[in-house]
Amino acid sequence: MENGNPLNQRQHHRAKLNGSVTLHPVLPSKLSNTLEVHPVSSAFKGIDVSEGGLCLELGDTNNPS
């Protein structure tokens, strides 16, 4: 471990994100063999992104409001 921090052992370089990220659910279409992007969305604060994934700040997940 580098400096005793396991986060320094990441496989992919991470790039910082500024601002929010909007996620839209994508589900199979009921009418055809395609995917549909649904209009319902959720916005989260973006932390960073890499080839291996996306890090988001979700807020207080114990409070449903």
Image (cartoon, rainbow, N blue to C red):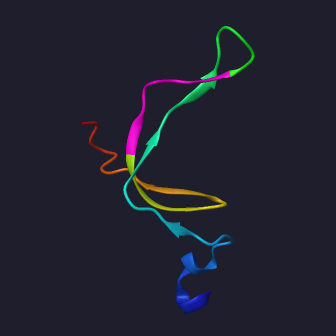
Residue 31 horizontal side relative to residue 21, left or right = right
Q: Nearer the viewer, residue 27 or 5?
A: 27
32 shown above or below 24:
above
The tally of labels here is: 0
Q: Position of residue 28 (x, y in %)?
A: 66, 21
The residue most toward the right is: 33
Q: Is residue 23 magenta?
A: no
Find residue 27 and report its horizontal and vertical position in percent: 61, 24
Please state the extent of the stretch shown in magenta in the rendering.
Answer: 35-43
Residue 11 vs 1, above or below: the answer is above
- Position of the N terminus by quadrant: bottom right
Q: Position of residue 5 (x, y in %)?
A: 53, 83
Residue at the bottom extreme? 3
Residue at the spot x=49%, y=33% of the render?
A: 24
Q: Is residue 37 magenta?
A: yes
Residue at figure coordinates x 66%, y 61% from the top left: 51
- Answer with the quarter of the image where residue 31 lies: top right
Q: Is residue 56 above or below residue 8?
A: above
Q: Residue furthest top?
A: 31
Side of 1 where 64 appears, left or right: left
Q: Quadrant of the C terminus?
A: top left
Residue at figure coordinates x 75%, y 16% from the top left: 33
Nearer to us in this view, 19 or 45: 19
Against 58, residue 64 (above or below) is above
Does residue 56 appear left or right of residue 9 in this picture?
Answer: left
